[in-house]
Image (cartoon, coloured by chain):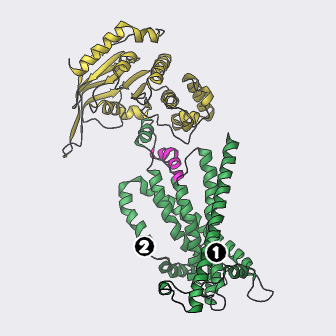
Chain colours: A yellow, B green
Amino acid sequence: MEVVSISNLSKIFNTGKDNEVEALREIDLTVTKGEFIALIGPSGCGKSTMLRLIGGLIPITSGELSVNGKTPTKAREERDYGMAFQSAGLLEWRTARKNIELPLELMGWSKAERIKRANEMLELVQLGEFARSRPAELSGGMQQRVAIGRALSFNPALLLMDEPFGALDEMTREHMQDQLLDICHKTESTVIFVTHSIPEAVFLSTRVVVMSPRPGQISSIVETNLRAGDNTADNTKIRNDERFYKKVTEVREALYGK
Amino acid sequence: MGKKLFLLLNKAAVRRILIFIAFLVLLALAYTAYKAFGQALDDRQRDWWFIGSFFPRTDDRNMPPILDILSEFGKSPRIGGETYISQLFSGALFTLREAFVAFVVGSIVGLVLAVLLAQSKLAERGVMPWVIVSQTIPLIAITPLVVLWGQANLDFLPWEWKTWMSVSVIASYLTFFPVAVNGVRGLLSPSSEHLELMQSYGASRVSILWKIRFPASLPFLFTAFKLAATAAVVGAIVGEISTGVSGGQGLGKLIFEFARTYAAAPERLYLGVIGAGITGLFAFGLIVLVEKTILNSTGQQIRE
């Protein structure tokens, strides 16, 4: 089942003005349910722009883009998206649990339902004891886990993540990657994940989409899928596996154009 | 943990009060020292190597002794009459009532303006200049207008219009401004990430306002409320004097009386200054207390 379908998509900012910028050119991409797409490319190549276009936060200039067969705006209104950014973006005046409840409040869930789901999400991201903590009392990694719990809380059809682990140290980062995969398998989420890190892209994804410098175009797509559908695969083994390094090399070559 | 924090705050508060008192004593000492110096110049008609021509001379009329000022609090205009300290106390209460109403009215007007101004660039460009212009007009230019409006036919109101209400309206003219300006800053303070997140949930403008913008602006609003509280007291006193509250019992009326009879007792002028200062400080302290309670419970930082 196609979750995202993009054909011949272009995005130009400030059309017709002096500061006109062609951000994306002729993008074609199809994402099916359960896929984990990693978007990688040099700074300013339009990765984040692409994510925002898919999320319906900014309008497309030309081409076609549909999410679950709907326009992005419609999909947004129907709450098909869960989003997570580089900074956790938690509301400082809300406790961890209340932060997770935020989207549920907007969707009109009852209080009891909200609390129940928020507690489930906290368990899922292993922060059960921190329900009443405020963001300022949590470490960066813990905040990011709350943010992921929030993004997943309403079972969105599509998870859009913009360098969510970019600000974390390597150890926390690997731990979060393991957790994210685990959660995504449990919830059968479809993910589009923007990153600057080649190993992260390879480790997490089923496919890595490599983009060229501005104007952003898809220069190649690397099939990674190191788990081959086996969700119980040992993450440490995968990280040390020869195939992992091969794919890293492959993505690197695609990125730097040999 | 919570209890420890509370104790710590208390310790800091005690230290702050001690420092305040120390400065007060220093101020009194400096006053007394200069008074002695200025008086010596005056008494002996000395010039002491030209020093005398640089420093103003003083006497008991323009710098009454501090003890005289303090003892004036206990005196009364007539034998057996109400002491000045008790007059000042009831005056402060009267003025605080006006200031409180002014604070509430001004804050509501300021908040409504802030929400309006934060909604669109157009609203801000259209209305903000008028908000600023409003503050360039001196209060005493407004007062006769407000007094006139107060004398208009206000029978449609469910309550009787009293002069002190006009004073509150005048004072609220000073209070809405900081609330409006800081309110706009607070409402626009959420990061684009928070706003995009809300957008991605398909949140309406109203829920963005209610769940993001308004809570985010709380620390900004309390900064404004502190300014507004002191402005409300000043506004109420100026309002009382310029409306000439007939039969009013506020601080403004007392200050006016003290000024009228200063020739007989210059010490009394200081009673007005001290009374107004303490009243303003009280209003300020009250807001600080509420600010601490609320921002502690929401886990937000107090903006200095």
Establish if B104 lies above or below A40: below
Q: Amino acid at mark 2?
A: Thr
Q: Amino acid at mark 1?
A: Ile
| Parent chain of label 1 | B
Mark 2 Cα-neighbour bin, 10 Å: few <14, some 14–19, many ≥20? few
Looking at the picture, tell me which residue is in the foreground, B239 or A143: A143
- Give the residue drawn at x 40%, y 33%: A76
Q: Which residue is disc 1 drawn over?
A: B274
Establish if B24 lies above or below B257: above
Task: Write down the region rendered in magenta.
Answer: B202-219
Q: Which residue is disc 2 drawn over?
A: B136
- Give the residue drawn at x 45%, y 35%: B201
Quadrant position of residue A68: top left
- x and y, in percent, of residue B174 in the image: 51, 69
- Give the residue drawn at x 56%, y 78%: B238
Element type at mark 1: helix
Quadrant position of residue A50: top left
Mark 2 → mark 1, Cα distance in angstroms: 28 Å
Residue B231 shown left or right of residue A74 in the figure: right
Q: What secondary structure do most residues of the magenta stretch adopt?
A: helix
- x and y, in percent, of residue B301 in the image: 55, 47
The quadrant of the picture occupied by the N terminus of chain A is: top left
Q: Is residue B291 visible?
A: yes
Looking at the picture, tell me which residue is in the foreground, A5 or A86: A86
Quadrant position of residue A21: top left
For the image, the number of numbered tags is: 2
Establish if A142 lies above or below B112: above
